[in-house]
Image (tube, helix red, strand yellow):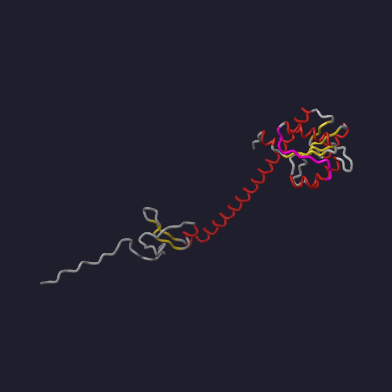
Amino acid sequence: MRLTESDILNASVLIVDDQESNVLLLEQMLTGAGYRNVVSTMNPREVFALHRKHHYDLILLDLQMPGMDGFQVMEGLKTSDTDGYLPVLVITAQPGHKLRALQAGARDFISKPFDLVEARTRIHNMLEVRLLYKQLENYNQVLEQTVRERTAELRESEARYRSLTELASDWYWEQDENMHFTKVSGPVLEMLGIRVGPLAGEGPAAPWRMAGTKRSAKPCRRPSPRASPS
C-alpha cells in the first residue's frame, strides 16, 4: 500500500466552527497548503447529513458552539459512521477539554489560538493515517472477496473429483501414439472438460468412437477384377 502527497492533498476536509473568522483562517491555511477539497459549515446540526453524503476524510470540529457543542456532534457521528472510524480533529481553547475529547473518540486536537505550523502538521499526519486506514479496509475487502472466490472454486473442484472417482470404474478410452483419442467409453471427455475433433479414423459426423465399435483406421481396398480367359 502506497500513499502519495497528492493523495493527501486530494482528501476531503470539513470545517465545523460557529466563528466565521476561524473558518476563514482554516480555509486559507489549507488551500494555501495545497488542499483541494475543503468545505465548511457554521451549523453543527448539518454535520451528520453532510458526512453521510460525502464521507469526509477529516472533520475539523470546534468544541464550543451554541445549540450543539462538539461533544454532541461526535456522539451523533458515532451512530452514523459506518466504518467505525471517527475522523475528527477537535479545535478547542480549553486545555481541560483535550483529554475529554480524545476519550470521546477524537483522533487529535488543535489548540486555540492557532499555531499554523502545528495545525498544518497535525492535519497532514491525521489525513495520512486516515487514508492508510481506508486503503487497508479496501485491501481487506478485496482479500475477502478473493478468498470467497477461491473457496468456491475449491468446492467445485472437490465435487468434480468425487464425480470422477465415482464414475472412473465405468470409463474406458484408448489413445494412439500421437495421444489422440481413438476409443471412448463413458463421459470421459465431458467430465475431463476436453473437446476434441473427430477421433482417429472417423468422419466429421462422429465426434468419437464408443468402445466395442470396430472400424479400421485404414481405408478398405476391393480386389482388382481378374481378366477373363480368352
Q: Is residue 74 left or right of residue 176?
A: right
Which residue is located at x 57 percent, y 55 percent? Answer: 156
- Magenta stretch: includes residue 74: no
Image coordinates of residue 168 in percent, x first then y, are: 49, 59
Which residue is located at x 15 percent, y 69 percent? Answer: 227
202, above or below 230, in the image: above
96, above or below 148, in the image: above
Image coordinates of residue 112 in percent, x first then y, are: 84, 31
Image quarter where the C terminus lies is bottom left
Residue most extreme to the left: 230
Q: Nearer the viewer, residue 218 or 32?
A: 32
76, above or below 197, in the image: above
Image quarter where the N terminus lies is top right
Q: Which stretch appears magenta?
A: 34-45
Asked which quadrant contains residue 17, the reply is top right
Which residue is located at x 84 percent, y 45 percent? Answer: 45
62, above or below 153, in the image: above
Q: Nearer the viewer, residue 12 or 187?
A: 12
